[in-house]
Amino acid sequence: MKLEVVVLAAGKGTRMRSALPKVLHLVAGRPMLSHVLESAQKLSPDHIHVVCGHGAAQVREYFSHDPTINWIFQAEQMGTGHAVCQALPDISTQSTVLVLYGDIPLILPGTLQRLTDEARDGSLALLSASFDNPHGYGRVVRDSDNAICAIVEEADASSDQRKISEINTGFIAAPAE
């Protein structure tokens, strides 16, 4: 099955208080997006789609040497789901889609490979983590069989749900169909 990677890189990075697009901020001497693309490329995907918005021209210019990137412009930033939808017309329905974030540079290729492998049978796979203090993160709610039944954002969580330490990282792999 084909592998299509969608990297979300359209955010403004308002909290960084910088005119530089968030994904171009340096980590270990390289832009955050560079690290994410390197990890994605190690999976040998059929295509890498980068959804950009704020500072798109600057981001594209920085990576203009890489002809393997399919650039998708998100004119209006309307959330993560909307950003992923911008890439769907360019994605084969016979593929697994791996969604990454251009501002999370420390994701390892091995982690991404395991996540992708989990989705190869047609399932949706998500990467979760457990924190001692998960304040501010969406909680992964499981049923009595340990299956994921919901992801509840902090603002919408009940007091019992806020006690859950397992959080949604946002990384997902799923069939394109």
Image (cartoon, rainbow, N blue to C red):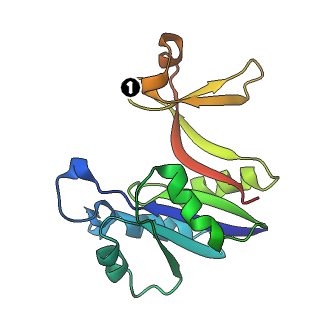
Expressed as whole percent of the image width and height from the top left, the position of residue 98 reads 62, 59
> Which quadrant of the structure image shows residue 149?
top right
Q: Residue drawn at (40%, 88%), measured in percent from left and top?
A: 65
Residue 35 placed where, x, y %?
41, 66
Place of residue 74 in the rendered image (x, y in percent of width and height, measured from the top left)? 44, 65
Is residue 86 among the parts visible in the rendering?
yes
Q: Where does label 1 land, which residue?
A: 135
At horizontal 27% and vertical 64% (from top left) the residue drawn is 21
In the image, residue 99 sits, relative to residue 134, either above or below, namely: below
- The residue positioned 76% from the left and 58% from the top of the image is 177
Q: Secondary structure at mark 1?
A: loop
Instruction: Work out which quarter of the rendered image holds the N terminus and state it.
Output: bottom right
> Closest to the observer: 26 or 50?
50
Number of disc labels: 1
The quadrant holding residue 166 is top right
Is residue 53 rendered to the left or right of residue 148?
A: left
Asked if 47 appears above or below 153 in the picture, the reply is below
Name the outermost residue toward the top.
159
Most distant residue in the front direction: 76
Identify which residue, 151 or 35, lies in the foreground. Answer: 151
| Residue 29 falls left or right of residue 130 | left
Tag 1: amino acid: His
Q: Residue at x 53, y 83 (%)?
A: 68
The crowding category of the residue bearing disc 1, from other C-alpha atoms within 10 Å (few below 14, some 14 to 19, many at least 20), is: some
Question: Does residue 24 appear left or right of residue 156 in this picture?
Answer: left
Q: Residue furthest right?
A: 121
Does the rendering let one see residue 44? no
User: Residue 33 at what x, y percent from top left?
Assistant: 39, 66
